[in-house]
Image (cartoon, grey):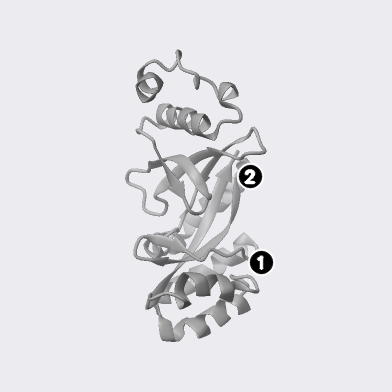
Amino acid sequence: MDYVERYFGGLGPSRTLAMCRGNRYRQARRLRTLLTEATGIEASVRRSAALEQSVPFIELPGAHTVKTAYLHMKDDEDAVWLTLFPADTLGQARTLYTDHAAVERLLALRERSWELRPNFHFGFIQSGLARTPSELAVEDYIKLWQSEIGSSVSIPSEAWPRYLDWLIEKRVAADGYQETFDRAFTDTDRESATPRPGLRLVHS
């Protein structure tokens, strides 16, 4: 199947998305091919914690504020979604939020049918954990992190309660976020949590 998909795409059962309808595995294979053809970069498939499914992706060469692009579908829709996560790590966030021109260009994408919204979570080593919806408008969310990013560092466990109170006070995190955070950090052996004031950028 993999050989046919790569070299004889017109022969296989996954040669159009319509033929893949109802089969997530075949959809992912077809989307991987489309993403590879569109970008010239060999796409792979992996599980995305943020998207809660296995999806085709590419790593973006030379990018400093966003690392990965995903192409995926949802079970109840025929739309194809291109999703990116700018500022998904603290390093990416520092680069983005200190570049005002880049922020303005990012916000301007909304005029071209892109959707941009907050995607705050914490990181531990390579993992992104404890995501939370935010009540802040994306403009206010970005302004907050433009002012805070210079002092944002990994938070030791003894400072977690104070930092969580601040997140909820600023409406970065929703009420009840403590329970989500506890499952990912407080109830584990982890001793630090790194804020990742990210964004989700989507076009369908």
Figure check: 127 above or below 3: below
Residue 55 in the image: x percent, y percent?
47, 41
Looking at the image, which residue is at 42% across and 66% down?
123
Figure check: 128 above or below 24: below
Task: Please report whichever mark, 1 or 2, sits nearer to the chain's N-terminal start.
Answer: 2
Looking at the image, which residue is at 50% across and 81% down?
163
Query: Pointer 1: what residue?
Result: 135
* Residue at the outermost left position: 62
**Amino acid beneath label 1:** Glu
Determine whether the residue tagged by mark 1 lies in a helix, strand or loop.
Answer: loop
Residue 153 seen in this snapshot: no
Looking at the image, which residue is at 47% across and 54% down?
86
Query: Pointer 2: what residue?
Result: 111
Looking at the image, which residue is at 48% across and 52% down?
85
Residue 98 in the image: x percent, y percent?
43, 64
Residue 80 in the image: x percent, y percent?
58, 35
The image quadrant that residue 119 belongs to is bottom right
Quarter placement of the C terminus? top right
